[in-house]
Image (tube, helix red, strand yellow):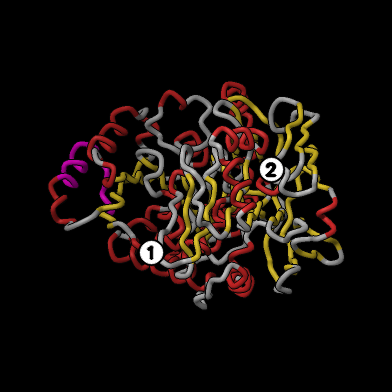
């Protein structure tokens, strides 16, 4: 019978996603067929699956760690926030609704069936399934109808290990407090705990570790030091986005939009030694010496266009373009660069239309059908082949489409302004292609490093698995799975 183990967290952002990725790679190294699974995820960082749907980007990375192509069953419920109180609901890879939090709470109990259905298919196909929780089981006010943590664990009969984050402080209270608020039937599923993100001499925490064991009655599976190689792996949360400043590098500025999506587009640029990547935060001006400004993807294009204007970035962009600076809009950012964005059916928010930035002679109309596809293309300017993906709603047309950014088979993709300085494309993942990235950076006056992005990610995953093996009781963890 296929076995399963669930990693939950004593809080959000404790490192569950990377722990699961490392466990997947470690299990694969032991010759096991292993698959990741997250019942419910909330993220605007999504990946297109081989079966034509979308899942959280973290689960796509975990699939890579397991040596698998990502499939929708790995993350059957994905919530993509569009406002502070509402999100798009994606079930088994397909958008089914946009709901406010209270309405989703009413819908959630009906989602356990597809969650268990997806989990059952993975169990039938693999030796081991490693499950990632969401948020924390200590949020007992959300326990009724829960499908993400203990609700799922009880329905599926999966043992749980809870990870605490010592880097943020209070890890003893995190774990002992979680024990204190759990329902006894939920607590019976908790087989142990581990400590993540330790810095310094771990023996200094020996007393605290024993205290957690005594006060919870849970078994400890180890203290995991902070893993430096994590910087080479995609971040799941936009709060983790960081620029990488390098003196003398070509300066690329990216706008930190309020609903930024698919921001792992930036990771290969952040890793390039020749690039000085600046994340422009709210209230900050766009650097006047930037060679390129990137408008990234957004889950709420019109909302983020208003956000952009509220920061004064529209004025900065016009000045940047006037100085001869280049601009690249990706997906939602591409739509913002046009003359107008219309949403007559209110798909992303209130129905209506807004003027765009006017840097590209194109217009966009939002449509209910979402394009989800992996795409092979040829960059028009360099002739370099690229492989990326599209994940968007909306159709964009206009005169500047006559100068495409790329070609997909026989059709043009994206747009280029008449002066060649402003570019727009729906293609995500472009910069992961080494030859294209080097050619693109050369066009900005930068010398590529010869860095190979894919092997760098693989090396980081191998290092992560070795890191877990050195500091955690992996034999004990895998023996828990049932």
Residue 330 percent coordinates (x, y): 66, 52
Image quarter of residue 135: top left
> In terms of secondary structure, where does tag 1 sit?
helix
- On the rendered structure, is 24 left or right of 10? right
Q: Is residue 219 shown in magenta?
A: yes
- On the rendered structure, is 482 left or right of 304? left
Q: How many marks?
A: 2
- Residue 235 in sight from this viewpoint: yes
Q: Give the residue at mark 1.
A: 229
User: Does the magenta stretch mainly form a helix, a strand or a loop?
Assistant: helix
User: Where is 407 relative to 372, above or below?
Assistant: below
Residue in the image at 30% along x and 59% along y = 472
- Residue 112 in sight from this viewpoint: no
Residue in the image at 42% along x and 58% along y = 244
- On the rendered structure, is 460 left or right of 145? left
Residue 275 percent coordinates (x, y): 48, 65
Residue 456 percent coordinates (x, y): 48, 71
Q: Which residues are magenta?
A: 208-222
Mark nearest the camera among 1 and 2 is 2
Work out how far the residue at label 1 is from the one at label 2, CA to CA, in angstroms: 35 Å
- Choose between 390 and 66: the one closer to the eye: 390
User: Where is 164 relative to 290, above or below?
Assistant: above
Residue 207 percent coordinates (x, y): 12, 47
Q: Give the residue at mark 2.
A: 336
């Amino acid at each position: 019978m296929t076995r399963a183990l669930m990693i939950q967290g004593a809080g959000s952002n404790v490192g569950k996603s990377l722990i699961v990725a490392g466990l997947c790679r470690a299990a694969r190294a032991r010759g096991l067929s292993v698959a990741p699974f997250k019942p419910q995820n909330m993220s605007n960082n999504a990946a297109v699956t081989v079966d034509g749907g979308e899942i959280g980007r973290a689960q796509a990375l975990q699939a890579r760690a397991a040596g698998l192509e990502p499939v929708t069953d790995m993350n059957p419920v994905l919530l993509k926030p569009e406002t502070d109180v509402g999100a798009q609901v994606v079930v088994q890879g397909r958008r089914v609704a946009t709901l406010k939090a209270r309405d989703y709470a009413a819908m959630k109990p009906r989602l356990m069936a597809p969650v268990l259905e997806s989990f059952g298919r993975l169990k039938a196909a693999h030796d081991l399934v490693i499950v990632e929780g969401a948020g924390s089981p200590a949020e007992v006010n959300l326990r009724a109808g829960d499908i993400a943590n203990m609700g799922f664990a009880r329905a599926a009969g999966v043992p749980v290990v809870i990870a605490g984050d010592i880097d943020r402080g209070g890890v003893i209270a995190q774990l002992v407090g979680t024990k204190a608020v759990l329902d006894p039937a939920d607590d019976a599923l908790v087989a142990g705990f581990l400590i993540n993100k330790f810095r310094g001499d771990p023996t200094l925490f020996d007393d605290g570790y024993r205290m957690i064991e005594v006060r919870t009655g849970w078994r400890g599976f180890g203290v995991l030091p902070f893993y430096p190689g994590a910087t080479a792996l995609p971040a799941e949360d936009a709060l983790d986005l960081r620029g990488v400043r390098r003196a003398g590098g070509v300066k690329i500025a990216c706008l930190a939009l309020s609903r930024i999506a698919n921001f792992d587009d930036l990771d290969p640029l952040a890793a390039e030694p020749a690039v000085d990547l600046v994340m422009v935060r709210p209230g900050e001006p766009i650097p006047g010496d930037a060679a390129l400004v990137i408008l990234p993807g957004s889950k709420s294009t019109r909302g983020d266009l208003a956000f952009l204007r509220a920061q004064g970035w529209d004025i900065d962009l016009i000045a940047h373009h006037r100085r001869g600076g280049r601009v690249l809009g990706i997906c939602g950012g591409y739509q913002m660069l046009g003359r107008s964005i219309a949403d007559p059916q209110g798909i992303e928010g209130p129905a209506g239309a807004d003027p765009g930035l006017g840097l590209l002679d194109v217009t966009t109309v939002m449509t209910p059908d979402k394009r989800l596809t992996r795409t092979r293309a040829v960059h028009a300017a360099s002739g370099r082949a690229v492989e990326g993906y599209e994940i968007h709603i909306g159709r964009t047309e206009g005169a500047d489409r006559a100068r495409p950014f790329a070609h997909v088979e026989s059709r043009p993709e994206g747009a280029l302004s008449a002066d060649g300085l402003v570019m727009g494309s729906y293609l995500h993942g472009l910069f992961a292609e080494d030859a294209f990235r080097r050619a693109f950076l050369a066009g900005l006056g930068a010398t590529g490093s010869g860095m190979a992005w894919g092997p760098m990610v693989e090396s980081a995953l191998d290092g992560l698995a070795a890191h877990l093996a050195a500091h955690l009781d992996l034999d004990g963890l895998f023996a828990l799975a049932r």
